[in-house]
Image (spheres, helix red, strand yellow):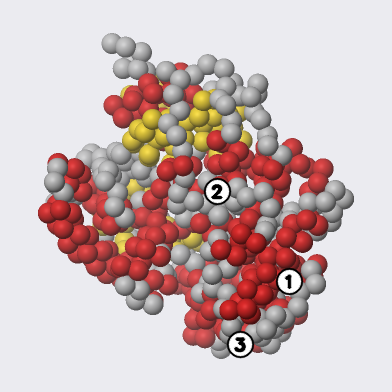
Amino acid sequence: MDAIDSLLLKESCTIYQLTEEQKQCVEAARVGKDVKIKAFAGSGKTSTLVAISRELSGKGLYLAYNKAIQTDAARKFPLHVDCKTAHSIAYRATAYQIKDRVRTLSIFDILRYMDIKRIYSYEENDIAYLTLKLLRVFVNSDKKEIDEKFKYSGVLDDVRGEKLEETEAIKDYVIGRAAEYWKQCTERGSTLPIEHDFYLKMYQLSNPDLRGVYDFILFDECQDANPVLLDILLKQKCQKIYVGDEHQQIYSWRGSINSFAKLGGEICYLSRSFRFGNEISRLANIIITAKNEAQLLCGSASIDSKLVANKLTAPFTVLCRTNARIIEKILTFQKNKLHVVGGVNEILNLAKSGYALYSGNKDKVSHSKLKYFKSWEAMLHFNHKYQDPDITFLAKLIKEHKGSFKKIINQIEDACYVEEGKAEVTLSTIHKSKGREWDNVVLEDDFIIFTNEVPLEEILVYDVEELNLIYVGVTRTKANLLLTGGVSSFLKRLESFTAKRMSLIAELELNDSAKVYQFPSHEAVAI
């Protein structure tokens, strides 16, 4: 028996025998290779990385996606591995420039600190929105400066003047405003506000070299990496082990990209989930197969997870696409002991600001998404063009409950201060559920692709991230999953569509590779 065969992972006083897939990952890393681990939902990626770290000598760095993951990882990894976020490393390197300046920027900030003028049909709010959008794209890119190349990068594709010269002039103006803000906010002694990603960009442009500090880097959740972080990592000369699931990429609005194609290294898979059984894995496979994934996610036959038709017995967790639906669910379950993942402050701010704007009390609007709008009608006009999910469902909610919405806000304040472990109903957005799991899960259907009845062909091209959100939601359960009507109907459509596609693939393929597209052989369950 070799070392890998006998390798045991001790975690929280529990001993796990590594699977064959995990052993392959450990062996690839142990011989010094860069490794890319494609790890599906619940497949033991953290356990695998811990096992790898115990086999590697020297100083290691575990790069976590957020603070919560970092804190959890610090309890699991051996002492020779530092557990940090990229932002924490960057902050320490640039803190003298950014102390007391970091917050979430709004269009209001752009209008306040920059000289913004109307350009043809584009009002000041439109220019400020596009300027902030371009700034966020830039700080998450690997570009060195904001220049005219951004005219053709796709960032400003929606800009349309009445004539070509007007379109070009609007784009040039936005690029100039964004470049000027970046120049001013990075000057020594600047007091301009910046977001967290701004100082990560500053760090990247300083060309950091981690040689001599770390011998290997473990990069978790690499599917959520943006180009600026990839640029930092790819320039490091030490061994790198990447792990992620491209089907859980749900942060493109923050600049994340599907990084697997850009990363080098030997490819390994973690395809068996230890979280759920075959019934749930079937649903996940419907989604990932539609996206042309060749490797299937296998559930654990020993786990009795299942779909339920009508209702769940408390405690259970409700996953929503939007904060606005969270508000709605608070009202539904207000007589229960409620907990909201991440707290209720942001949701309260959204509700209060939305109602204030609707009521004409502009001075009481404080939420970053709403405070720059001059009126409720201006918000609706803006959202008609840019389709923000939170604004879409908030507008619907206020319209339906306008006579009692002030009472609703009071109910939100009174309902949600129970610890999660004591809650009967836990509420979370899908984004905040990532990396979490619960015994009983309800997946809500507040997706714009459902309400707008977007054709599947368009979703598979333009709304892949919405598919990823559904995949994340479906795979959070350990025992029971309840799908609301919109999700259930959508998965039926997607399964039918995918089956037809796979039949065509099988006919066209001239070799055995077509077989990797087949669904698992376990029993089909009505959705």
**Please, what secondary structure does the residue beneath circle 3 have?**
helix
Residue 58's disc is none
Residue 427 at x, y = what percent?
A: 48, 60
Residue 123: image x %, image y %?
Answer: 68, 81
Q: Residue at x 73, y 71 (%)?
A: 108
Q: In the rendered image, is residue 216 in sight?
A: yes
Which element carries disc 2, helix, strand or loop? loop
Residue that numbered label 1 is attached to: 108
* Residue type at the position of mark 3: Glu
Residue at image location 53% in from the left, 67% down from the top: 323
Q: Earlier in the sequence, mark 3 or mark 2?
A: 2
Asked whether the beta carbons under mark 1 and mark 3 sit within 8 Å of each other, the answer is: no
Label of residue 226 in the image: 2
C-alpha span from label 1 to label 2: 26 Å
Spot occupied by residue 318 in the image (x, y as percentages of width and height) = 42, 61
Pick the front one: 474 or 108: 108
Query: What amino acid does circle 2 point to?
Result: Asn
Local secondary structure at mark 1: helix
Which residue is more in the foreground, 372 or 42?
372
- Above or below: residue 38 compared with residue 158: above
- Percent x, y of residue 115: 80, 72
Determine whether, in the image, residue 290 is placed left or right of residue 130. Answer: left
Q: Nearer the viewer, residue 15 or 290?
A: 290
Measure how far apart labels 1 and 3 are at the Cα level.
18 Å
Judge the density around disc 3: few (<14), some (14-19), many (≥20) Cα neighbours within 10 Å: few
- Tell me the residue that label 3 is attached to: 377
Q: Is residue 202 left or right of residue 334?
A: right
Is residue 12 at least partly visible in the picture? Answer: no
Q: Are marks 1 and 2 in contact (CB under 8 Å)?
A: no
Tell me which corner region of the image, top left, top right, bottom left or bottom right, holds residue 267: top left
The amino acid pointed to by label 1 is Phe
Residue at the far front: name it. 165
